[in-house]
Amino acid sequence: MKRSSTFWVLGAIFLTALVLRPPVAQIGPILEDIQKALGLDSSQAAILAAIPVLCFGFGAFASPALVRRFGVNRTMVYLLAVLVLTIAIRPYAGFLGLVIGTTLAGLAMAVANVLLPSVVRARFPKHVVVLTSAYTTLLAVSASFAAAFSYPSALWLGWQLSLAIWALPTLLALLLSFSLLSGDQSVSESENEDPRGDTKLILRSPMAWAIMALFGIQSLGFYALLAWLPSLAIDSGMNPSDAGALLSLMTVVGVPLGLILSSNFGRFKSLSLVGTLISLVTLTGMCLLLLQLWVPAAIVIGIGQASSFPLSLSLISTRAANQRLTTMLSSVSQGIGYLIAAAGTFLFGWVATVTGNWEVSVLGLIGLTMVQAGAAWFAGKPKLIK
């Protein structure tokens, strides 16, 4: 790949990563404003919070079919075009339009989530771990930025423009993504293989199921708190601005450590101990959350989550024997994982509504994080799916 082409492709990858979290992260801090403006009840608000993650699950399963039809490169361009339109329009179309727009945006982000590891592996096979850690860091930074400025920007601009303004950086990502259409066209790796055979191979692999469990549970913890941590804190007496800052703290505090740790994953033959320790850090933070020690909980959870997400993506990128299996493993792991996260995000809010408090929901996260630790131990073993 030519140096100029490499520059634009890297720009496309990194800017795409920057716009794949804000459409989700910015909703939590202003969810009550949206409820009041649109007259939503708590169940409708819970559905709105769960839609993106649910779409992340279902959309991921569509990725292999789209790749076979259009190829990875062209699919990425189409996805970003859909994102630009839906992000710009959804706040101004009422509740139904917001639901439809969020659904379409979620589906587009889901497929892009699946394809990014495949693009990185195909374009930069010698730098998979480093680039994966870099773009997962950007995912975390953009989520933190969106969460921190969602409420203040809603005060300044109104909640609708606060949501729609992210169409601008997404448009820039779309323009850069055209660089993927030139040069190396082997990203789709269209071997004459039966995709059903790949799916069966993945579903019969204990390693793949461990990766799915790790990805799903860490995603559940992240998205449940992304959607509900501000409400949890507000219900305890915190003002909305501080609650948004707390969410921002959780999403950004672990980024430096996560970047350092994830960029060194390739140094370890086995990631079992590392993955288990990361999960135990998250577990400690969940226990602090139960005690309503807000700032320590946000810091410790943030450190654990900022490390577990790149760990799961690194395992997806490195535990499959070839790029075709990487795409399928990414599709199935993220599909099932995000469906787990979507169900958990909805149940986290629903259980709190039914019980009248948040303790039972947090206890559920504590139990699941224990399961995550076991999955991380197994998924970290140095074995290939082939």
Image (cartoon, rainbow, N blue to C red):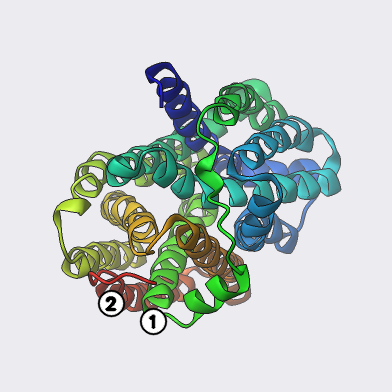
Q: In the rendered image, which quarter contains the N terminus?
A: top left
**Helix or strand or loop: what does disc 1 sit on?**
helix
Give the foreground label among 2 and 1: 1
Which residue corresponds to the image point at 47% horizontal and 22% vertical from the top-left? 8
Is residue 308 in view from this perspective? yes
Which residue corresponds to the image point at 33% horizontal and 65% vertical from the top-left? 286
Q: Nearer the viewer, residue 96 or 41?
A: 96
Q: In the rendered image, which quarter contains the C terminus?
A: bottom left
Q: Amino acid at mark 2?
A: Phe
Residue 253 rendering spot, x and y as whole percentages = 29, 42
Q: Kindly identify which residue carries mark 1.
A: 206
Residue 375 rendering spot, x and y as whole percentages = 33, 76
Q: Kindly identify which residue carries mark 2.
A: 378
The reply to whether dot 2 and dot 1 touch (C-beta < 8 Å) is yes
Which residue corresponds to the image point at 61% horizontal and 50% vertical from the top-left? 111
Q: Amino acid at mark 1?
A: Pro
Residue 333 rendering spot, x and y as whole percentages = 49, 66
Position above or below: 11 against 130: above
Q: Residues within 10 Å of mark 2 (few under 14, many from 20)?
A: many
- Picture quadrant where residue 288 is located: bottom left
Specify the farthest residue to the top: 4
- Picture quadrant where residue 381 is located: bottom left
Residue 207 lies left or right of residue 358; in this view the side is left
Residue 189 lies left or right of residue 134; in this view the side is right
Rounded to the nearest whole Å, what is the CA distance between mark 2 and mark 1? 9 Å
Position above or below: 367 against 272: below
